[in-house]
Amino acid sequence: MNDGANYQELSRRYGFAPKPESASRLTQLVARQDADLDEIAKVIDKDPSLRARLLRVANPDAENEAEYAIETVEDALMRNGMGCVLVLAMSTPLSQALVKTFQTMLSLKLESVDPRAVTPLTGEHLLCTIGFSGKVVGHVFLRMSIDAGRSIAAGIIGANAEELNDPNEIRDVAGELLNIMTGNFKSNLCDAGLECKLSPPDVRSTGDFSASASRGSSIEHMAFRSGGIQLFVDVTANPWSGD
Amino acid sequence: MATKILSVDDSRTIRMIVGRTFKPYECQVCEAGNGEEGLAAAAREKPDLIILDVTMPVMDGVTMLSKLKEDPELKTIPVIMLTAESGRENVLQIAKLGVRDYLVKPFKEDQLIEKAGRIVPLAKRPAA
């Protein structure tokens, strides 16, 4: 039995959930380096959510769709290159892992929302960062208000939010949430041949954060909401800039 | 006699969840924060089951598993991997080293009980 068949057999035995197909396919195409833009465009065009997100990534300054200067998948790919495809491919498993984590561990239904439609975080808030390096280089940032961090930590630990005053406990939960999300997307990257390593999560309070893409990188901003909790996720990635 | 379970994870949150998961059962849960501490705890406590993370500082879970399997005293202790990483190479390498089961984070506490219950006896504690 070859490795692929062995892995499928083990996935069945261990009860692994299937991985998002379009994201896996996209990652494989990016990993090939010589992938045809038409082939990539076909995969994205088949998935309305990927298409909408690609156009949002390609029009970072637009407030809404009416302001989009880049309106087609082909134009977005021509102008932004593989970097934006990679962040799309990465942020799909990230986003799914985040939603699943909240559903599984907190019984909370997290809804993905347009980050431009959400009130941004102001003042002191919690910033969790994990870097990845290897055949792809970048960062994943998870941000939330201190109150949201406390409420999430209380839910996971099974404590009363008002009694949870140890900042280390809140930080450990936030860091583990990001660990779970990034572990899922790292598997996706490695399976496609984009081997990379993750840094340990860095969790801190900050009043000053701005995620921006460095030269050659792409960035995707995402936001999620459930009740009074708002979460912001930013992903930056640059393929082939590493080892 | 209580079933002895060793939870090896660098996250205090996960160790706490594992401890809470087995609280209703006749189990004694001990903890370690990385693979090196995990090996020492396994040698000291001789647990009936080890629940092991992959990515940890100092010594990762794959290295700990490989050292565990090289030790004649410890190699028969069953291991369940509990990790967010389910990439093909990791899973194949870990399966080759020998684990009884694999649970991908995020997980529900009853999934862990179900998998552990297939390996070690889990008797409910009598109501207080």
Image (spheres, coloured by chain):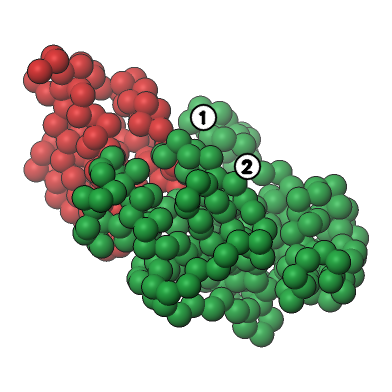
Chain letter matching colour green: A
- Classify B88 as above or below A209: above
User: What is the x, y in percent for residue A144?
Assistant: 45, 62
Give the residue type that dot 2 points to: Lys
Give the residue drawn at x 54%, y 62%.
A232
Q: Quadrant of the C terminus of chain A?
A: bottom right
Looking at the rendered structure, the secondary structure element under dot 2 is loop
Residue A15's disc number: 1
- The x, y position of residue A148, in whole percent, is 40, 56
State which chain is coloured red: B
Residue type indicated by callout 1: Gly
Q: Residue B46 appears in which quarter of the rendering?
A: top left
Say which residue appears at 18% left-offset and 45% top-offset: B31
Q: Point out residue B39 in the picture as x, y percentages from the top left corner.
A: 19, 49
Location of the N terminus of chain A (image quadrant): top right
Examine the rendering and report whether any part of residue A81 can be seen. no
In this view, A242 is above or below A128: below
Residue at mark 2 = A19
Residue shown at the point (73%, 73%) measured from the top left:
A60
Residue A97 position (above or below residue B5): below
The residue nearer to you, when weighing A227 against A17, is A227
